[in-house]
Image (cartoon, coloured by chain):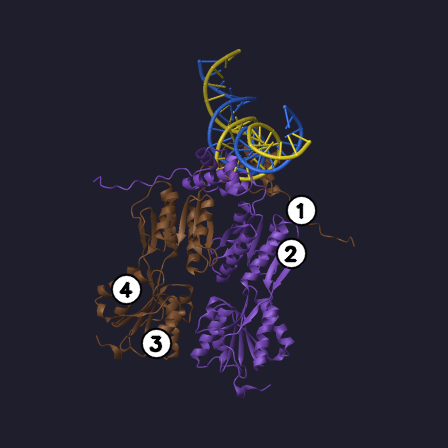
Chain colours: A brown, B purple, C yellow, D blue
Amino acid sequence: MGMGRKEPPVRKRRPTLADVAAAAGVSVPLVSIVMRNVPGASPLNRERVRQVAADLGYHPDQRARLLRQQRSRLLGVTFDVEQAFHGDLVEGIYLSAEAAGYDVVLSAVTPGRPETRAIDNILDDRCEAAILLGPRSSTRSLATLAAKLPVVVIARNVKASAVDCVRTDDRIGMNLAVGHLKEMGHRDIAYLDGRGAPGAVERLRALKAAAAVHGLSDRVLVVPAGPSEEDGATAMHRWLTQIAGVTAVIAFNDRCALGVLDTLLRAGISVPQDMSVVGYDDSRIARISYVNLTTVGQNPHDLSRLAVHRAIARLEHQPGNPRDQIVGPQLIIRTTTGPPPPFSTKG
Amino acid sequence: MGMGRKEPPVRKRRPTLADVAAAAGVSVPLVSIVMRNVPGASPLNRERVRQVAADLGYHPDQRARLLRQQRSRLLGVTFDVEQAFHGDLVEGIYLSAEAAGYDVVLSAVTPGRPETRAIDNILDDRCEAAILLGPRSSTRSLATLAAKLPVVVIARNVKASAVDCVRTDDRIGMNLAVGHLKEMGHRDIAYLDGRGAPGAVERLRALKAAAAVHGLSDRVLVVPAGPSEEDGATAMHRWLTQIAGVTAVIAFNDRCALGVLDTLLRAGISVPQDMSVVGYDDSRIARISYVNLTTVGQNPHDLSRLAVHRAIARLEHQPGNPRDQIVGPQLIIRTTTGPPPPFSTKG
DNA sequence: CCGGCGGGCTATAACGTTCTATATTGCCGC
DNA sequence: GCGGCAATATAGAACGTTATAGCCCGCCGG
């Protein structure tokens, strides 16, 4: 019975500029001036209005604000919730955008929410430009989108004249990986291909180019695998019995490399004494101490910074020169690579 | 020289209702009626307006629309880009929200973007309710937030009367894990604690309760570890030499369990013949074929569905009964658990 | 004493949409 | 022929904010 019943939290309509103005005894535009920190109000009123606004718990309505202004200063970003790497990119995008005075609207792609819907969302929200992380849409539909607003694609090369791209150059990455192995004395190298995964074709081509540069074209063995741990493990398992002389493996990506490592461990082949392994991506898994995978890392910070700046440049009508911007990857040398075992140096 | 120069893509101001109305020769409100699919327009005009809108590439301005309406029907969601599980939850939230006619505003928490900023963002965007995934803010500040709008927290228990919680019950999960092991014949079980990780205390308490239920209170050994692969590997390594008789390990989470598996593999202890291992979370890593980890899985679909419905119920003034909703986890039996080796049955 | 100037403040309109109220039909029954 | 009704269309105001222009007042030089 009536003892200390909690009052229900009465949530009234959120306060507006008019409420603050009335409470402070000034006009609405003056409050607006104070909230925006622009000149035109006396220090006295400025202080008073600030106080009243804080007391009322006033928050400016972002939507009304954007509606009135000519520009929204909004960047729409689509990303895939399943890709850990996209998380790193999102982080970088927030940073660069806020530094440039732009705001970010996120729109996720999930198994149940196709990319088209994610894109429609950022269109509805009046974003001035779109930054798409690893989009799967056709070149054609991306070009259509680019007719409506500036589009910057990260981590995919889209051959449409109106679409900007920012991506890592696999040729540089593979060059680093092969160069590192050659320097240590390896000659016979196996490459586990991504087999149909996005970007696999480019990466294979890059590997072949790197092999040619280092004069190892006929020493490189390409094995079909895939993008997952399972693919790496299966391919390595099947292939273990068939090779001899190969002293190093480059995997399509880190997950694939992880499967390779597991198979080698179970087969009693020690890494890096008997076999060197190089991954690709520098995903979080590569950094675990007991994995400690040598890998080619993309630079999410640079990728996102370039993408944001490129989008803003388009908005401010300074297209800039290269439509397709390349970020150099870096080789992160950990403990899965080392010199080949002495008895196997046959070249 | 002048051959086939591409015309620069002229991006004009985006079309508005007024533009469509003028082009179709009808009034603005009529176009609005058509675009919203509400009664009040003739089939003839409906068709015409649709056609014209499509031709102009008209997209309704979500911000203006929400400004005019009394309600925004917007749910603000904060999530952590580093937590893969949050991705699964986001997916479910989109699904449930769209089914209920609500829209979702995402706001990410990253290493460089603190939770407070993410929350301010959804406040500025006029969301009607907030759904926070594993928030790290203090109970106090969450309560303050709840005074402004309904707040539903997923995956954390917040003891504030105005904050709803939806979470998995660790007691059920641990009960399943211990029960499964006991059923197979295990008696002496080690638990690798999360040591300071969010939720570790509750999970440890739940384990102890489960042990008590199964009459194994004095057979369970608690070992400090941590939430990462590395923690699991280190703890297992250090601890391997000190135990005897223990036939099963329950890890704080899957990542920790992965470290355990790796250490066991390197030590030549086979799983599950010599030792059973149970994880917690059913993260993607647990499903890899060569890992194939028996684990306690949270149900992201149910969690997100309940959270969305709870938020909407609050908005529509039907608070409903339990402020703290529990979703039952499920045991996913894979191949890292089996009967204990015969010689070790001592109880 | 007057015209001009500038700081501080406010009235008003506008952003793109939707709500409310009101007109304009055509059609029916009496 | 006329009131009533439903269906369709439009005029006008409103949402919360900001841009523009103008008002008021005290001050200065002439």
Does residue A63 show up?
no
- Kind of residue indicated by mark 4: Leu
- Kind of residue indicated by mark 3: Arg
Q: Which mark is residue A238?
A: 3
- Kind of residue indicated by mark 1: Val
Closest to the camera, between mark 4 and mark 2, is 4
Chain letter of the residue beneath label 2 in the structure image: B
Q: Please name whichever residue, A8 or A272, is drawn nearer the observer in this view of the structure.
A: A8
Chain letter of the residue beneath label 3 in the structure image: A
Residue A170 x, y percent position in the rendering:
31, 60
Give the SS element for disc 4: helix
Give the SS element for disc 3: helix
Chain letter of the residue beneath label 4 in the structure image: A
The answer to whether marks 2 and 1 sit on the same chain is: no
Q: Which mark is residue A10?
A: 1
- Whether residues under marks 4 and 2 lie with C-beta atoms below 8 angstroms apart, the answer is no
- Kind of residue indicated by mark 2: Ala
Categorize mark 4 by other alpha carbons within 10 Å: few (<14), some (14-19), many (20+): many
Categorize mark 3 by other alpha carbons within 10 Å: few (<14), some (14-19), many (20+): few
- Splitting the image into 4 quarters, where does residue B324 fall? bottom right
Whether A275 is drawn above or below C28: the answer is below
Q: Which mark is residue A207?
A: 4
Q: Which residue lies under the disc numbered 2? A: B160
Point out the tag, 1 or 4, that comes first from the N-terminus: 1
Q: Please name whichever residue, A185 or A148, is drawn nearer the observer in this view of the structure.
A: A148
Residue B184 x, y percent position in the rendering:
56, 81
Mark 2 to mark 3 CA distance (whole Å): 57 Å
